[in-house]
Image (cartoon, coloured by chain):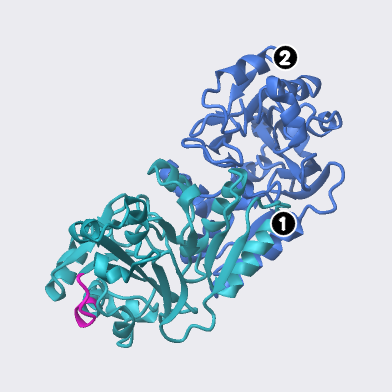
Chain colours: A blue, B cyan
Amino acid sequence: MKLDFDITIIGNGSASPHKTRYPAAQYLSTEGHHWLVDCGEGTQFRLMRMGLKRSKLEGIVITHMHGDHYLGLFGLLSSMSMDQRSKPLYIVGPSSLESLVKAHINQGGYQMSYAIEFIHTDGVKEKVTLLEQGGLKLESFPLQHRIPCWGYRFTYHKQTYHLKLDKIKLLGIPQSAWSQIGKGMDYADDTMNYMNAELTDKEEQWKSYAYCSDTAYFDELVNYIRGVDLLYHEATFLEAKSIRASETFHATANQAATIALKGQVRDLLIGHFSSRYDELDEFLIEAKQVFESTQIAEQGQVFSIQ
Amino acid sequence: MKLDFDITIIGNGSASPHKTRYPAAQYLSTEGHHWLVDCGEGTQFRLMRMGLKRSKLEGIVITHMHGDHYLGLFGLLSSMSMDQRSKPLYIVGPSSLESLVKAHINQGGYQMSYAIEFIHTDGVKEKVTLLEQGGLKLESFPLQHRIPCWGYRFTYHKQTYHLKLDKIKLLGIPQSAWSQIGKGMDYADDTMNYMNAELTDKEEQWKSYAYCSDTAYFDELVNYIRGVDLLYHEATFLEAKSIRASETFHATANQAATIALKGQVRDLLIGHFSSRYDELDEFLIEAKQVFESTQIAEQGQVFSIQ
Protein backbone atom coordinates (compact mmCIF):
# COMPACT_ATOMS: atom_id res chain seq x y z
CA MET A 1 0.00 0.00 0.00
CA LYS A 2 1.48 3.31 -1.06
CA LEU A 3 2.65 5.61 1.70
CA ASP A 4 3.31 9.21 0.71
CA PHE A 5 6.13 11.10 2.37
CA ASP A 6 7.13 14.29 0.54
CA ILE A 7 9.64 17.02 1.22
CA THR A 8 9.11 20.26 -0.72
CA ILE A 9 12.09 22.60 -0.83
CA ILE A 10 11.06 26.20 -0.17
CA GLY A 11 14.52 27.69 0.28
CA ASN A 12 18.02 26.29 -0.19
CA GLY A 13 20.08 29.41 0.51
CA SER A 14 22.20 30.42 3.47
CA ALA A 15 22.63 33.49 5.66
CA SER A 16 23.96 36.00 3.15
CA PRO A 17 21.06 36.74 0.78
CA HIS A 18 21.18 35.55 -2.84
CA LYS A 19 19.09 36.83 -5.73
CA THR A 20 17.34 33.56 -6.42
CA ARG A 21 18.03 31.31 -3.43
CA TYR A 22 15.80 31.82 -0.42
CA PRO A 23 16.63 31.14 3.21
CA ALA A 24 16.01 27.74 4.78
CA ALA A 25 12.52 26.24 4.75
CA GLN A 26 11.00 22.89 3.80
CA TYR A 27 7.44 21.56 3.86
CA LEU A 28 7.08 17.96 5.00
CA SER A 29 3.91 16.04 4.18
CA THR A 30 2.92 12.53 5.04
CA GLU A 31 -0.47 10.94 5.73
CA GLY A 32 -2.35 13.37 7.98
CA HIS A 33 0.79 15.29 8.93
CA HIS A 34 2.21 18.56 7.62
CA TRP A 35 5.26 20.20 9.17
CA LEU A 36 7.43 23.13 8.33
CA VAL A 37 11.14 22.52 8.80
CA ASP A 38 12.86 25.86 9.43
CA CYS A 39 11.12 29.06 8.38
CA GLY A 40 13.41 31.67 6.84
CA GLU A 41 12.26 35.18 5.99
CA GLY A 42 9.51 35.27 3.37
CA THR A 43 8.47 31.63 3.76
CA GLN A 44 4.77 32.50 4.03
CA PHE A 45 4.80 34.21 0.63
CA ARG A 46 6.53 31.26 -1.02
CA LEU A 47 4.08 28.81 0.59
CA MET A 48 1.22 30.76 -1.01
CA ARG A 49 2.87 30.81 -4.40
CA MET A 50 3.62 27.08 -4.24
CA GLY A 51 0.06 26.22 -3.20
CA LEU A 52 1.18 24.79 0.15
CA LYS A 53 -1.48 25.49 2.76
CA ARG A 54 -0.38 27.03 6.04
CA SER A 55 -3.73 25.96 7.49
CA LYS A 56 -2.66 22.32 7.32
CA LEU A 57 0.47 22.78 9.41
CA GLU A 58 0.58 20.72 12.58
CA GLY A 59 3.87 22.19 13.69
CA ILE A 60 7.06 24.02 12.84
CA VAL A 61 10.55 22.92 13.83
CA ILE A 62 13.34 25.50 14.00
CA THR A 63 16.97 24.40 14.13
CA HIS A 64 18.61 27.49 15.62
CA MET A 65 18.45 31.21 16.18
CA HIS A 66 20.25 32.46 13.09
CA GLY A 67 17.89 34.69 11.12
CA ASP A 68 17.98 32.71 7.88
CA HIS A 69 16.30 29.82 9.73
CA TYR A 70 13.50 31.48 11.70
CA LEU A 71 12.74 35.07 10.60
CA GLY A 72 9.70 34.01 8.58
CA LEU A 73 8.03 32.54 11.65
CA PHE A 74 6.45 35.67 13.14
CA GLY A 75 4.67 36.76 9.96
CA LEU A 76 3.40 33.24 9.35
CA LEU A 77 2.06 32.92 12.91
CA SER A 78 0.28 36.23 12.60
CA SER A 79 -1.25 35.28 9.22
CA MET A 80 -2.55 32.04 10.74
CA SER A 81 -4.29 34.10 13.39
CA MET A 82 -5.80 36.40 10.74
CA ASP A 83 -7.07 33.17 9.12
CA GLN A 84 -8.89 32.50 12.42
CA ARG A 85 -7.04 29.22 12.86
CA SER A 86 -8.32 27.37 15.92
CA LYS A 87 -6.17 24.22 15.89
CA PRO A 88 -3.15 24.44 18.23
CA LEU A 89 0.27 24.64 16.58
CA TYR A 90 3.48 23.04 17.80
CA ILE A 91 6.63 25.13 17.65
CA VAL A 92 9.79 23.16 18.30
CA GLY A 93 13.08 24.89 19.02
CA PRO A 94 15.13 26.53 21.76
CA SER A 95 13.32 28.33 24.60
CA SER A 96 14.80 31.62 23.36
CA LEU A 97 12.56 31.22 20.31
CA GLU A 98 9.51 31.09 22.57
CA SER A 99 10.62 34.34 24.23
CA LEU A 100 10.95 36.06 20.87
CA VAL A 101 7.61 34.75 19.59
CA LYS A 102 5.93 36.06 22.74
CA ALA A 103 7.71 39.42 22.47
CA HIS A 104 6.50 39.87 18.88
CA ILE A 105 2.94 38.94 19.82
CA ASN A 106 2.98 41.33 22.78
CA GLN A 107 4.52 44.25 20.87
CA GLY A 108 1.98 43.88 18.09
CA GLY A 109 -0.88 43.68 20.58
CA TYR A 110 -2.08 40.53 18.81
CA GLN A 111 -4.86 38.34 20.22
CA MET A 112 -3.92 35.01 18.69
CA SER A 113 -6.84 32.88 17.53
CA TYR A 114 -5.07 29.60 18.38
CA ALA A 115 -2.79 28.15 21.04
CA ILE A 116 0.93 27.62 20.45
CA GLU A 117 2.45 24.57 22.13
CA PHE A 118 6.17 25.10 22.50
CA ILE A 119 8.48 22.11 22.69
CA HIS A 120 11.98 23.12 23.79
CA THR A 121 15.16 21.59 22.49
CA ASP A 122 17.52 23.25 25.02
CA GLY A 123 18.21 20.05 26.97
CA VAL A 124 18.72 17.83 23.92
CA LYS A 125 22.31 16.46 24.13
CA GLU A 126 21.81 13.23 22.19
CA LYS A 127 18.98 11.80 20.08
CA VAL A 128 15.69 12.12 22.00
CA THR A 129 12.03 11.74 21.08
CA LEU A 130 10.14 15.03 21.36
CA LEU A 131 6.73 13.99 20.10
CA GLU A 132 4.95 10.86 18.92
CA GLN A 133 1.44 11.04 17.55
CA GLY A 134 -0.67 9.64 14.73
CA GLY A 135 2.16 7.39 13.57
CA LEU A 136 4.66 10.24 13.32
CA LYS A 137 7.67 10.35 15.62
CA LEU A 138 9.76 13.50 15.89
CA GLU A 139 13.25 13.17 17.30
CA SER A 140 15.89 15.81 17.83
CA PHE A 141 19.66 15.65 18.22
CA PRO A 142 22.44 18.22 18.68
CA LEU A 143 24.40 19.64 15.76
CA GLN A 144 27.68 21.57 16.03
CA HIS A 145 27.27 25.18 15.04
CA ARG A 146 28.38 28.59 16.31
CA ILE A 147 25.30 28.79 18.48
CA PRO A 148 23.20 25.91 19.85
CA CYS A 149 21.59 24.09 16.95
CA TRP A 150 19.52 20.94 16.57
CA GLY A 151 18.81 18.46 13.83
CA TYR A 152 15.46 16.68 13.48
CA ARG A 153 14.44 13.19 12.47
CA PHE A 154 10.89 12.43 11.37
CA THR A 155 9.75 8.80 11.22
CA TYR A 156 6.33 7.80 10.01
CA HIS A 157 5.19 4.30 10.86
CA LYS A 158 2.11 2.83 9.27
CA GLN A 159 0.48 -0.51 10.00
CA THR A 160 -1.93 -1.87 7.41
CA TYR A 161 -4.09 -4.92 8.15
CA HIS A 162 -5.04 -6.87 5.02
CA LEU A 163 -8.09 -9.04 5.73
CA LYS A 164 -7.74 -12.79 5.13
CA LEU A 165 -11.14 -12.74 3.49
CA ASP A 166 -11.38 -16.46 2.71
CA LYS A 167 -10.76 -17.35 6.34
CA ILE A 168 -13.04 -14.61 7.71
CA LYS A 169 -15.89 -15.76 5.51
CA LEU A 170 -15.28 -19.40 6.41
CA LEU A 171 -15.46 -18.51 10.10
CA GLY A 172 -18.74 -16.72 9.48
CA ILE A 173 -17.58 -13.37 10.89
CA PRO A 174 -20.26 -10.83 9.94
CA GLN A 175 -19.36 -8.11 7.47
CA SER A 176 -20.21 -5.43 10.03
CA ALA A 177 -17.08 -6.42 11.98
CA TRP A 178 -14.64 -6.32 9.05
CA SER A 179 -13.87 -2.61 9.28
CA GLN A 180 -12.71 -2.90 12.90
CA ILE A 181 -10.62 -5.98 12.10
CA GLY A 182 -9.08 -3.99 9.25
CA LYS A 183 -7.94 -1.46 11.84
CA GLY A 184 -6.08 -4.15 13.80
CA MET A 185 -8.75 -5.03 16.38
CA ASP A 186 -9.31 -8.56 17.65
CA TYR A 187 -12.73 -10.11 17.08
CA ALA A 188 -14.99 -11.67 19.67
CA ASP A 189 -18.67 -12.53 19.96
CA ASP A 190 -20.59 -14.97 22.24
CA THR A 191 -19.03 -18.02 20.72
CA MET A 192 -15.79 -16.98 19.04
CA ASN A 193 -12.59 -15.15 20.02
CA TYR A 194 -9.88 -14.44 17.43
CA MET A 195 -6.66 -12.48 17.68
CA ASN A 196 -6.27 -9.97 14.86
CA ALA A 197 -3.12 -11.74 13.68
CA GLU A 198 -5.25 -14.81 12.80
CA LEU A 199 -7.56 -12.73 10.61
CA THR A 200 -5.19 -10.36 8.82
CA ASP A 201 -1.83 -10.08 7.16
CA LYS A 202 -0.14 -7.17 8.82
CA GLU A 203 1.98 -4.88 6.66
CA GLU A 204 4.33 -2.47 8.39
CA GLN A 205 5.91 0.51 6.66
CA TRP A 206 8.42 3.03 7.92
CA LYS A 207 9.66 6.17 6.25
CA SER A 208 12.25 8.40 7.77
CA TYR A 209 13.79 11.76 7.07
CA ALA A 210 16.58 13.59 8.87
CA TYR A 211 17.32 17.30 8.55
CA CYS A 212 20.79 18.59 9.48
CA SER A 213 21.35 22.32 9.07
CA ASP A 214 23.60 24.06 10.14
CA THR A 215 26.57 22.03 11.29
CA ALA A 216 30.28 21.46 11.11
CA TYR A 217 31.34 17.91 10.29
CA PHE A 218 31.42 15.64 13.35
CA ASP A 219 31.46 11.85 13.48
CA GLU A 220 28.79 11.37 16.18
CA LEU A 221 26.22 12.77 13.79
CA VAL A 222 26.35 9.45 11.95
CA ASN A 223 24.66 7.78 14.91
CA TYR A 224 21.77 10.22 14.89
CA ILE A 225 20.89 9.84 11.22
CA ARG A 226 21.83 6.20 10.67
CA GLY A 227 19.70 4.36 8.16
CA VAL A 228 17.20 7.08 7.30
CA ASP A 229 15.55 6.89 3.89
CA LEU A 230 16.39 10.49 3.11
CA LEU A 231 19.01 12.70 4.71
CA TYR A 232 19.12 16.43 4.17
CA HIS A 233 22.56 17.71 5.09
CA GLU A 234 23.80 21.23 4.62
CA ALA A 235 26.65 21.77 2.15
CA THR A 236 27.38 25.47 2.47
CA PHE A 237 30.79 25.20 0.79
CA LEU A 238 32.79 23.12 -1.64
CA GLU A 239 35.74 21.18 -0.24
CA ALA A 240 38.13 23.81 -1.66
CA LYS A 241 36.74 26.10 1.05
CA SER A 242 36.94 23.52 3.85
CA ILE A 243 38.89 25.88 6.10
CA ARG A 244 36.21 28.55 5.75
CA ALA A 245 33.62 25.82 6.38
CA SER A 246 35.18 24.72 9.64
CA GLU A 247 35.78 28.32 10.79
CA THR A 248 32.08 29.09 10.34
CA PHE A 249 30.87 25.68 11.63
CA HIS A 250 29.49 24.65 8.28
CA ALA A 251 30.02 21.56 6.12
CA THR A 252 31.27 20.95 2.60
CA ALA A 253 29.53 18.82 -0.05
CA ASN A 254 32.20 16.19 0.52
CA GLN A 255 31.53 16.15 4.25
CA ALA A 256 27.76 15.92 3.78
CA ALA A 257 28.29 12.93 1.50
CA THR A 258 30.68 11.34 4.01
CA ILE A 259 28.00 11.54 6.72
CA ALA A 260 25.49 9.96 4.32
CA LEU A 261 27.92 7.17 3.44
CA LYS A 262 28.89 6.36 7.02
CA GLY A 263 25.27 6.58 8.13
CA GLN A 264 24.16 4.14 5.41
CA VAL A 265 21.24 6.34 4.43
CA ARG A 266 19.44 5.63 1.20
CA ASP A 267 19.42 9.08 -0.42
CA LEU A 268 21.09 12.40 0.29
CA LEU A 269 19.83 15.91 -0.36
CA ILE A 270 22.24 18.82 -0.08
CA GLY A 271 21.43 22.50 0.34
CA HIS A 272 22.12 25.72 2.31
CA PHE A 273 24.52 26.87 -0.39
CA SER A 274 26.66 29.94 0.26
CA SER A 275 25.69 32.95 -1.84
CA ARG A 276 29.29 33.05 -3.15
CA TYR A 277 28.33 30.22 -5.53
CA ASP A 278 25.96 30.93 -8.42
CA GLU A 279 26.22 27.49 -10.05
CA LEU A 280 25.55 24.34 -8.04
CA ASP A 281 26.84 21.64 -10.41
CA GLU A 282 30.15 21.38 -8.57
CA PHE A 283 28.35 20.53 -5.34
CA LEU A 284 26.69 17.55 -6.96
CA ILE A 285 29.89 16.33 -8.60
CA GLU A 286 31.82 16.61 -5.34
CA ALA A 287 29.17 14.83 -3.25
CA LYS A 288 28.58 12.05 -5.78
CA GLN A 289 32.26 11.11 -5.69
CA VAL A 290 31.65 10.01 -2.10
CA PHE A 291 27.95 9.12 -2.13
CA GLU A 292 26.32 8.42 -5.48
CA SER A 293 22.69 8.83 -4.52
CA THR A 294 22.88 12.58 -3.92
CA GLN A 295 20.56 15.29 -5.22
CA ILE A 296 20.58 19.07 -5.03
CA ALA A 297 17.71 20.40 -2.91
CA GLU A 298 16.36 22.55 -5.76
CA GLN A 299 13.79 25.14 -4.71
CA GLY A 300 10.25 24.25 -5.65
CA GLN A 301 11.12 20.59 -6.12
CA VAL A 302 9.30 17.82 -4.26
CA PHE A 303 11.35 14.87 -3.05
CA SER A 304 9.18 11.83 -2.40
CA ILE A 305 10.50 9.01 -0.28
CA GLN A 306 9.65 5.83 -2.22
CA MET B 1 19.18 73.23 -10.71
CA LYS B 2 17.55 69.80 -10.65
CA LEU B 3 16.98 68.26 -7.25
CA ASP B 4 16.18 64.55 -7.22
CA PHE B 5 13.79 63.19 -4.65
CA ASP B 6 12.50 59.70 -5.44
CA ILE B 7 10.23 57.27 -3.64
CA THR B 8 10.42 53.65 -4.83
CA ILE B 9 7.53 51.43 -3.78
CA ILE B 10 8.77 48.05 -2.53
CA GLY B 11 5.51 46.80 -1.04
CA ASN B 12 1.96 48.15 -1.11
CA GLY B 13 0.15 45.32 0.72
CA SER B 14 -1.28 45.09 4.21
CA ALA B 15 -1.20 42.61 7.08
CA SER B 16 -2.94 39.62 5.57
CA PRO B 17 -0.57 38.29 2.88
CA HIS B 18 -1.47 38.61 -0.79
CA LYS B 19 0.01 36.63 -3.68
CA THR B 20 1.51 39.61 -5.47
CA ARG B 21 1.39 42.50 -3.01
CA TYR B 22 4.20 42.64 -0.49
CA PRO B 23 4.12 44.19 2.97
CA ALA B 24 4.98 47.85 3.55
CA ALA B 25 8.35 49.20 2.44
CA GLN B 26 9.56 52.19 0.45
CA TYR B 27 13.02 53.41 -0.52
CA LEU B 28 13.53 57.17 -0.35
CA SER B 29 16.44 58.74 -2.24
CA THR B 30 17.52 62.34 -2.43
CA GLU B 31 20.95 63.93 -2.86
CA GLY B 32 23.29 62.05 -0.53
CA HIS B 33 20.46 60.50 1.47
CA HIS B 34 18.85 57.07 1.28
CA TRP B 35 16.23 55.92 3.75
CA LEU B 36 13.99 52.93 4.08
CA VAL B 37 10.44 53.73 5.15
CA ASP B 38 8.97 50.67 6.89
CA CYS B 39 10.52 47.27 6.27
CA GLY B 40 8.02 44.44 5.90
CA GLU B 41 9.06 40.79 5.67
CA GLY B 42 11.21 40.02 2.64
CA THR B 43 12.21 43.64 1.92
CA GLN B 44 15.91 42.76 1.63
CA PHE B 45 15.23 40.30 -1.20
CA ARG B 46 13.14 42.83 -3.11
CA LEU B 47 15.81 45.52 -2.65
CA MET B 48 18.30 43.18 -4.29
CA ARG B 49 16.01 42.38 -7.17
CA MET B 50 15.21 46.06 -7.74
CA GLY B 51 18.89 47.03 -7.68
CA LEU B 52 18.46 49.25 -4.60
CA LYS B 53 21.62 49.10 -2.52
CA ARG B 54 21.25 48.40 1.19
CA SER B 55 24.80 49.69 1.64
CA LYS B 56 23.65 53.23 0.84
CA LEU B 57 21.02 53.36 3.58
CA GLU B 58 21.52 56.09 6.16
CA GLY B 59 18.57 54.99 8.23
CA ILE B 60 15.31 53.11 8.51
CA VAL B 61 12.07 54.50 9.91
CA ILE B 62 9.43 52.11 11.23
CA THR B 63 5.88 53.29 11.85
CA HIS B 64 4.66 50.68 14.33
CA MET B 65 5.02 47.19 15.70
CA HIS B 66 2.65 45.30 13.42
CA GLY B 67 4.59 42.62 11.59
CA ASP B 68 3.81 43.78 8.06
CA HIS B 69 5.74 47.00 8.80
CA TYR B 70 8.93 45.75 10.48
CA LEU B 71 9.54 42.00 10.12
CA GLY B 72 12.08 42.47 7.33
CA LEU B 73 14.29 44.58 9.55
CA PHE B 74 16.23 41.85 11.37
CA GLY B 75 17.34 40.01 8.24
CA LEU B 76 18.38 43.25 6.58
CA LEU B 77 20.41 44.34 9.61
CA SER B 78 22.16 41.00 9.72
CA SER B 79 22.94 41.11 5.98
CA MET B 80 24.45 44.57 6.39
CA SER B 81 26.74 43.15 9.03
CA MET B 82 27.73 40.27 6.74
CA ASP B 83 28.58 42.98 4.18
CA GLN B 84 31.01 44.35 6.79
CA ARG B 85 29.21 47.69 6.81
CA SER B 86 31.06 50.16 9.03
CA LYS B 87 28.88 53.28 8.71
CA PRO B 88 26.42 53.70 11.61
CA LEU B 89 22.74 53.21 10.80
CA TYR B 90 19.79 55.12 12.24
CA ILE B 91 16.74 53.15 13.24
CA VAL B 92 13.73 55.30 14.05
CA GLY B 93 10.71 53.86 15.82
CA PRO B 94 9.30 52.96 19.22
CA SER B 95 11.68 51.83 21.97
CA SER B 96 10.07 48.38 21.86
CA LEU B 97 11.63 47.99 18.40
CA GLU B 98 15.07 48.58 19.90
CA SER B 99 14.40 45.84 22.47
CA LEU B 100 13.42 43.38 19.74
CA VAL B 101 16.40 44.28 17.54
CA LYS B 102 18.73 43.69 20.48
CA ALA B 103 17.01 40.41 21.37
CA HIS B 104 17.46 39.09 17.81
CA ILE B 105 21.11 40.14 17.76
CA ASN B 106 21.75 38.51 21.14
CA GLN B 107 19.92 35.27 20.33
CA GLY B 108 21.82 34.91 17.07
CA GLY B 109 25.13 35.60 18.79
CA TYR B 110 25.86 38.22 16.13
CA GLN B 111 28.81 40.59 16.39
CA MET B 112 27.50 43.51 14.36
CA SER B 113 30.08 45.24 12.15
CA TYR B 114 28.44 48.68 12.57
CA ALA B 115 26.71 50.75 15.22
CA ILE B 116 22.96 51.23 15.31
CA GLU B 117 21.75 54.62 16.52
CA PHE B 118 18.19 54.30 17.75
CA ILE B 119 15.89 57.32 17.72
CA HIS B 120 12.75 56.68 19.71
CA THR B 121 9.31 57.95 18.78
CA ASP B 122 7.57 57.01 22.06
CA GLY B 123 7.22 60.58 23.30
CA VAL B 124 6.04 62.04 20.00
CA LYS B 125 2.55 63.51 20.61
CA GLU B 126 2.58 66.19 17.92
CA LYS B 127 4.88 67.00 14.99
CA VAL B 128 8.51 67.06 16.20
CA THR B 129 11.89 67.11 14.48
CA LEU B 130 13.86 63.93 15.13
CA LEU B 131 16.92 64.54 12.99
CA GLU B 132 18.35 67.26 10.78
CA GLN B 133 21.50 66.66 8.80
CA GLY B 134 22.97 67.29 5.37
CA GLY B 135 19.91 69.27 4.32
CA LEU B 136 17.47 66.54 5.25
CA LYS B 137 15.00 67.05 8.08
CA LEU B 138 13.08 64.12 9.51
CA GLU B 139 9.94 64.87 11.49
CA SER B 140 7.51 62.49 13.15
CA PHE B 141 3.91 62.83 14.25
CA PRO B 142 1.33 60.54 15.85
CA LEU B 143 -1.16 58.50 13.82
CA GLN B 144 -4.27 56.79 15.21
CA HIS B 145 -3.99 53.03 15.01
CA ARG B 146 -4.75 50.04 17.24
CA ILE B 147 -1.27 50.27 18.73
CA PRO B 148 1.00 53.36 18.92
CA CYS B 149 1.94 54.38 15.41
CA TRP B 150 3.83 57.31 13.89
CA GLY B 151 3.92 59.05 10.55
CA TYR B 152 7.07 60.63 9.11
CA ARG B 153 7.78 63.75 7.14
CA PHE B 154 11.01 64.14 5.18
CA THR B 155 12.04 67.60 3.96
CA TYR B 156 15.11 68.18 1.88
CA HIS B 157 16.36 71.75 1.63
CA LYS B 158 19.06 72.67 -0.83
CA GLN B 159 20.79 76.03 -1.24
CA THR B 160 22.64 76.61 -4.48
CA TYR B 161 24.93 79.64 -4.92
CA HIS B 162 25.26 80.75 -8.54
CA LEU B 163 28.39 82.89 -8.97
CA LYS B 164 27.93 86.40 -10.35
CA LEU B 165 30.94 85.83 -12.57
CA ASP B 166 31.02 89.21 -14.24
CA LYS B 167 31.14 90.96 -10.88
CA ILE B 168 33.64 88.51 -9.36
CA LYS B 169 36.01 89.00 -12.29
CA LEU B 170 35.57 92.76 -12.19
CA LEU B 171 36.49 92.75 -8.49
CA GLY B 172 39.59 90.72 -9.33
CA ILE B 173 38.75 87.84 -6.94
CA PRO B 174 41.19 85.04 -7.76
CA GLN B 175 39.83 81.85 -9.31
CA SER B 176 41.17 79.78 -6.40
CA ALA B 177 38.49 81.34 -4.17
CA TRP B 178 35.50 80.67 -6.46
CA SER B 179 34.79 77.17 -5.21
CA GLN B 180 34.37 78.35 -1.60
CA ILE B 181 32.19 81.27 -2.70
CA GLY B 182 30.07 78.75 -4.61
CA LYS B 183 29.47 76.95 -1.33
CA GLY B 184 28.07 80.11 0.24
CA MET B 185 31.21 81.41 1.99
CA ASP B 186 32.03 85.11 2.23
CA TYR B 187 35.25 86.32 0.67
CA ALA B 188 37.99 88.34 2.31
CA ASP B 189 41.64 89.05 1.69
CA ASP B 190 44.01 91.82 2.89
CA THR B 191 42.19 94.57 1.05
CA MET B 192 38.65 93.31 0.32
CA ASN B 193 35.71 91.93 2.31
CA TYR B 194 32.54 90.77 0.56
CA MET B 195 29.44 89.06 1.87
CA ASN B 196 28.47 86.01 -0.15
CA ALA B 197 25.15 87.59 -1.08
CA GLU B 198 27.06 90.25 -3.04
CA LEU B 199 28.88 87.62 -5.09
CA THR B 200 26.19 85.01 -5.78
CA ASP B 201 22.54 84.52 -6.63
CA LYS B 202 21.18 82.17 -4.03
CA GLU B 203 18.66 79.54 -5.11
CA GLU B 204 16.69 77.71 -2.46
CA GLN B 205 14.78 74.49 -3.08
CA TRP B 206 12.57 72.40 -0.79
CA LYS B 207 11.06 69.00 -1.40
CA SER B 208 8.87 67.27 1.12
CA TYR B 209 7.29 63.85 1.55
CA ALA B 210 4.95 62.57 4.26
CA TYR B 211 4.24 58.92 4.97
CA CYS B 212 1.07 57.98 6.86
CA SER B 213 0.51 54.27 7.46
CA ASP B 214 -1.44 52.87 9.34
CA THR B 215 -4.15 55.19 10.57
CA ALA B 216 -7.83 55.82 11.03
CA TYR B 217 -9.10 59.11 9.64
CA PHE B 218 -8.61 62.03 12.04
CA ASP B 219 -8.70 65.74 11.29
CA GLU B 220 -5.55 66.77 13.19
CA LEU B 221 -3.49 64.77 10.72
CA VAL B 222 -4.06 67.59 8.22
CA ASN B 223 -1.83 69.87 10.32
CA TYR B 224 1.04 67.40 10.25
CA ILE B 225 1.13 66.89 6.50
CA ARG B 226 0.04 70.35 5.33
CA GLY B 227 1.58 71.49 2.07
CA VAL B 228 3.89 68.55 1.37
CA ASP B 229 4.81 67.90 -2.24
CA LEU B 230 3.89 64.24 -1.98
CA LEU B 231 1.71 62.55 0.60
CA TYR B 232 1.56 58.78 0.96
CA HIS B 233 -1.58 57.84 2.84
CA GLU B 234 -2.83 54.35 3.47
CA ALA B 235 -6.10 53.32 1.83
CA THR B 236 -6.67 49.83 3.16
CA PHE B 237 -10.35 49.78 2.21
CA LEU B 238 -12.86 51.29 -0.19
CA GLU B 239 -15.51 53.58 1.30
CA ALA B 240 -18.05 50.74 1.07
CA LYS B 241 -16.09 49.12 3.91
CA SER B 242 -15.78 52.29 5.98
CA ILE B 243 -17.16 50.57 9.09
CA ARG B 244 -14.56 47.82 8.82
CA ALA B 245 -11.95 50.54 8.26
CA SER B 246 -12.84 52.41 11.41
CA GLU B 247 -13.11 49.20 13.46
CA THR B 248 -9.57 48.27 12.46
CA PHE B 249 -8.20 51.85 12.64
CA HIS B 250 -7.56 52.02 8.92
CA ALA B 251 -8.59 54.54 6.26
CA THR B 252 -10.55 54.35 3.02
CA ALA B 253 -9.43 55.76 -0.34
CA ASN B 254 -12.00 58.52 0.12
CA GLN B 255 -10.57 59.42 3.53
CA ALA B 256 -6.98 59.43 2.26
CA ALA B 257 -8.02 61.82 -0.49
CA THR B 258 -9.88 64.01 2.00
CA ILE B 259 -6.72 64.39 4.08
CA ALA B 260 -4.78 65.29 0.90
CA LEU B 261 -7.37 67.86 -0.08
CA LYS B 262 -7.60 69.50 3.34
CA GLY B 263 -3.82 69.45 3.70
CA GLN B 264 -3.36 71.17 0.33
CA VAL B 265 -0.66 68.72 -0.70
CA ARG B 266 0.44 68.60 -4.31
CA ASP B 267 0.18 64.87 -5.04
CA LEU B 268 -1.24 61.86 -3.25
CA LEU B 269 -0.06 58.26 -3.32
CA ILE B 270 -2.30 55.55 -1.86
CA GLY B 271 -1.36 52.04 -0.78
CA HIS B 272 -1.56 49.38 2.00
CA PHE B 273 -4.44 47.70 0.19
CA SER B 274 -6.32 44.93 1.97
CA SER B 275 -5.72 41.49 0.47
CA ARG B 276 -9.50 41.18 -0.02
CA TYR B 277 -9.13 43.36 -3.14
CA ASP B 278 -7.38 41.93 -6.20
CA GLU B 279 -8.05 44.90 -8.50
CA LEU B 280 -7.05 48.41 -7.47
CA ASP B 281 -8.87 50.52 -10.09
CA GLU B 282 -11.73 51.29 -7.72
CA PHE B 283 -9.32 52.82 -5.22
CA LEU B 284 -8.09 55.29 -7.79
CA ILE B 285 -11.58 56.19 -8.97
CA GLU B 286 -12.80 56.73 -5.42
CA ALA B 287 -9.82 58.87 -4.40
CA LYS B 288 -9.81 60.98 -7.56
CA GLN B 289 -13.43 62.00 -6.93
CA VAL B 290 -12.10 63.91 -3.91
CA PHE B 291 -8.51 64.68 -4.90
CA GLU B 292 -7.62 64.50 -8.58
CA SER B 293 -3.85 64.24 -8.31
CA THR B 294 -3.85 60.75 -6.84
CA GLN B 295 -1.80 57.73 -7.91
CA ILE B 296 -1.70 54.10 -6.85
CA ALA B 297 1.58 53.22 -5.13
CA GLU B 298 2.34 50.44 -7.60
CA GLN B 299 5.13 48.10 -6.53
CA GLY B 300 8.39 48.65 -8.36
CA GLN B 301 7.35 52.12 -9.49
CA VAL B 302 9.46 55.20 -8.74
CA PHE B 303 7.64 58.41 -7.86
CA SER B 304 9.84 61.47 -8.39
CA ILE B 305 8.94 64.74 -6.75
CA GLN B 306 9.31 67.34 -9.51
User: Vertical placement of B162 versus B268: above or below?
Assistant: above
Mark 2 vs mark 1, CA separation in Å = 36 Å
Viewer-proximal residue among B87 and B192:
B192
In the picture, residue A233 is in which quadrant? top right
In the picture, residue B7 is in which quadrant? bottom left
Chain ID at mark 1: B
At x 50%, y 68%, the residue is: B66
At x 55%, y 23%, the residue is: A280
Image coordinates for residue A27, horizontal then vertical, percent: 57, 42
At x 25%, y 64%, the residue is: B200
Question: Quick check: A10 left or right of B270?
Answer: right
Q: Amino acid at mark 1?
A: Gln
Question: Quick check: B184 left or right of B103?
Answer: left
Image coordinates for residue B5, horizontal then vertical, percent: 30, 59
User: Vertical placement of A97 versus B143: above or below?
Assistant: above
Residue located beneath label 1 in the image: B107
Residue B10 appears in the rendering:
no
Is A257 inside the magenta-drawn segment? no
Viewer-proximal residue among A59 and B16:
B16
Residue located farthest toward the front when viewing the structure as drawn: B191
The region drawn magenta spans B260-266
Residue located beneath label 2 in the image: A290
Image coordinates for residue B153, horizontal then vertical, percent: 37, 72
Q: Amino acid at mark 2?
A: Val
User: Vertical placement of B21 versus A297: above or below?
Assistant: below
Image coordinates for residue B155, horizontal then vertical, percent: 35, 70
